[in-house]
Amino acid sequence: MALQPSEKIWKNGQLIPWKDATVHVLTHGLHYGTGAFEGIRCYGTDKGPAVFRLKDHMVRLHSSAKAIQMRIPFTADQLCEATKETVRTNKLDSCYIRPIAFFGVSGIGVNPIGYPVETFIVAFPMGAYLGDEGMKKGIRVHTASWHRAPVGSVPATAKICGDYLNSALAVMEAKMNGFDETVMLNDLHMVAEGSGENIFMVKDGKILTPPVNAGILPGITRASVMTVAKDLGYEVVEQNFSRGELFLADELFFTGTAAEVTPIREVDRRQVGEGVPGPVTKSIQSTYLDVVKGKVAKYSDWLDPVG
Ligand code: PPE
C-alpha cells in the first residue's frame, strides 16, 4: 500500500522529521522480529479528529511487549498523549497510527535481554485497507496453504513483529494468485483469521467468530463489532469452524483497525451467499463506520479527541 508521508514522527519522547526516523542495521528487532506494534485509526468527528479506542491499543501494546519480555519505557497513558501530540503536530484529520517498540542495538545474538528499547509513533493518511470497492462490493479471498503458527510456538495473542512473517507469506500467496486477501487456518485446521484481520461468519441469523484460543489476535475491532452486533440484537457466538463451513456461510466479513468491516463475497472461488454483502454485514459495517466517526452517542467513550 502506497504511503503518504507526514511531517513528524515521535521517537522516544521527541518529534523528529519524517526522514530522520531511521534505525541502525544491527537493530535486534530487524534481525529477529523482537518488537511489538499497533495499528490505530483516528477519524474526523464533529468534535474534531478523535482516536478510536486509543487506550485499549496502548494497553495491548504493553501486553504484547510483556509477552516478549520487553519493557517499554513509557506508560500507556504517556503513549496516548504522545499519539495525540503526533496527530496534532502533523495537522492530520483522519489517519492511521502505527506505534512500534522493539529491541535496539547492543550486541549480536538472539537473546535481547538487557538491550535498549526504541519506541516510535507514526501517523499518516490512509484510506480503505482493502479498497473502496472492497468495502462496498466485498472482497475475494482464498484459504492460505500456510497455517497460522501453532499457539505453542509463538504468543499468537500478542501483536509481535516476527509473527507477521507468517501473515506476509500467506498474503503474498493470495495476491500472487489474484485474490484480495487470505483466510488462515490454525494447526488444528480450524479457521483462525486473515493476514491482518479477524473473521466473522453469519449463519442462520447467528454471528460466529473463532475464539481467542484458536490462535488469533484478540482484535479491538472484533471486540467492538461483537458489542455493536449484540446491541443491534444479534446473537454472537465465539465458536470454531472449518474451511468447509465457510462455503456454507450466509455471509462472511473481516474486521480490523485497517480493514474496518470488509465484506467477503467469494472464498476459494465459491460465492458467499448471493455474492454481494449481505444484510447483517451491511448493518454492522454501517453502524461501525458511524460509531468510529462519533455519530452514535452510546459509544462516544470509545473516541479520544486529539484536542
Ligand atoms: N488479526 C491480525 C493478524 C491483525 O494483524 C489484526 C490487525 C487484527 C487481527 C485485527 O485487530 P484490531 O486492529 O485490533 O481489530 N491488523 C493491523 C495491521 C495491518 C497491517 O499492518 O497491514 C491493523 O488492522 O491495523
Image (cartoon, rainbow, N blue to C red):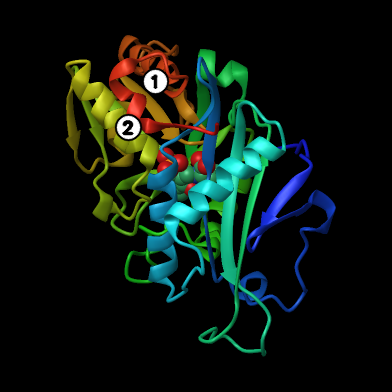
Q: Is residue 225 above or below residue 96?
A: above
| Secondary structure beneath label 1 | helix
Within the image, what quadrant is residue 65 found in? bottom left
Question: Which sits in the foreground, 165 or 84?
Answer: 84
Q: Are marks 2 and 1 in contact (CB under 8 Å)?
A: yes
194 relative position to 222: left or right: right
Residue shown at 17%/16% (left/top)?
233
Residue 231, horizontal then vertical, whole percent = 20, 20
Depth check: give the residue in front, 137 or 38.
38
Quadrant where the N terminus sits is top right
Is the residue marked 2 within 8 Å of ligand 1, measured from its CB? yes
Query: Looking at the picture, which amino acid does disc 1 mark?
Result: Val
The kind of residue tagged 2 is Ser
- Residue position marked by numbered label 1 in the rendering: 291
**Left or right of residue 104: residue 262:** left
Q: Position of residue 225 (x, y in %)?
A: 32, 29
Q: Which residue is mark 2?
A: 224
Residue 38: tell me if it is visible: no
In the picture, the quarter occupied by the C terminus is top right
